[in-house]
Image: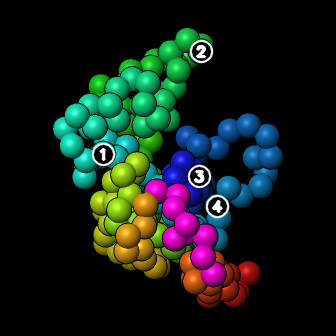
Amino acid sequence: MSAGGYLASMVGVTGGEKKFEFGDNLDQSSEVQAVVDIFGPTDLTKIAADFSKDTQKLYYSPGAPPSLFANGVPCYKGNRGGSILDTPETAKDSNPITHISKNTPPFLIMHGNADTTVSPSQSKIFYDALIKNGVDVDYYVVNGGEHNAAHFYQPKTFGIIVDFLNRVLKNF
């Protein structure tokens, strides 16, 4: 969910990309078989697209999570810091939507239409990009669902997730 949805999406779309292959266990595949993304950001440059101009300014400041995801904290060695909007190439590389390919695994995307933390349009643009690239994707808009609200902790929601995983992982 949220940042976890973002990270799961990044793992799902970057499996096997050489520039993301580093560290230990390189003899193991980094590709996954399925991704569940619940209200995760997918284009950090548009994370606040559905919000007021004042809120957008806050989201695009150097200390906001999207900027930190892409540019890091400047006091740590090697991190440039700065707004997500000031670093278009880093922003592009940090967006799951950028890395969709023919190897992208099936996705389940869920997002509440009353989310005031991550723009609901994030999931819609990701869904559209996955469909455009022929990826198996299920997309659910939770009516009245706010960010991390009780809507996402209900038996019906868990059932959707379990059904999706059972469907796409049946051959593994």
- Residue 31 is tagged as 4
Mark-to-mark CA distance, 3 and 1? 18 Å
Q: Amino acid at mark 2?
A: Tyr
How packed is label 2: few (under 14 Cα within 10 Å), some, or many (20 or more)?
few
Q: Amino acid at mark 1?
A: Ala
Q: Say which quarter of the image contains residue 126.
A: bottom left
Q: Secondary structure at mark 2?
A: loop
Q: Position of residue 58 (x, y in %)?
A: 32, 31
Say whether residue 3 is left or right of residue 51.
Answer: right
Residue at image position (73%, 81%) is: 172
Answer yes or no: is residue 167 visible. yes
Mark-to-mark CA distance, 2 and 4? 29 Å
- Labels 4, 3: front one: 3
Residue hosting label 1:
48
- Labels 1, 2: front one: 1
Please tell me which of labels 2 and 4 falls first in the chain.
4
Q: Amino acid at mark 3?
A: Gly
- Labels 3, 2: front one: 3
**Do tag 4 and tag 1 residues touch (Cβ < 8 Å)?**
no
Magenta highlight range: 147-155
How packed is label 4: few (under 14 Cα within 10 Å), some, or many (20 or more)?
some
Please tell me which of labels 1 and 2 falls first in the chain.
1
Residue hosting label 2:
76
Q: Nearer the viewer, residue 160 or 19?
A: 160
Mark-to-mark CA distance, 4 and 3? 17 Å
Residue at image position (64%, 44%) is: 21
Q: Say which quarter of the image contains residue 78.
A: top right
**Do tag 3 and tag 1 residues touch (Cβ < 8 Å)?**
no
Please tell me which of labels 3 and 2 falls first in the chain.
3
Q: Amino acid at mark 4?
A: Glu
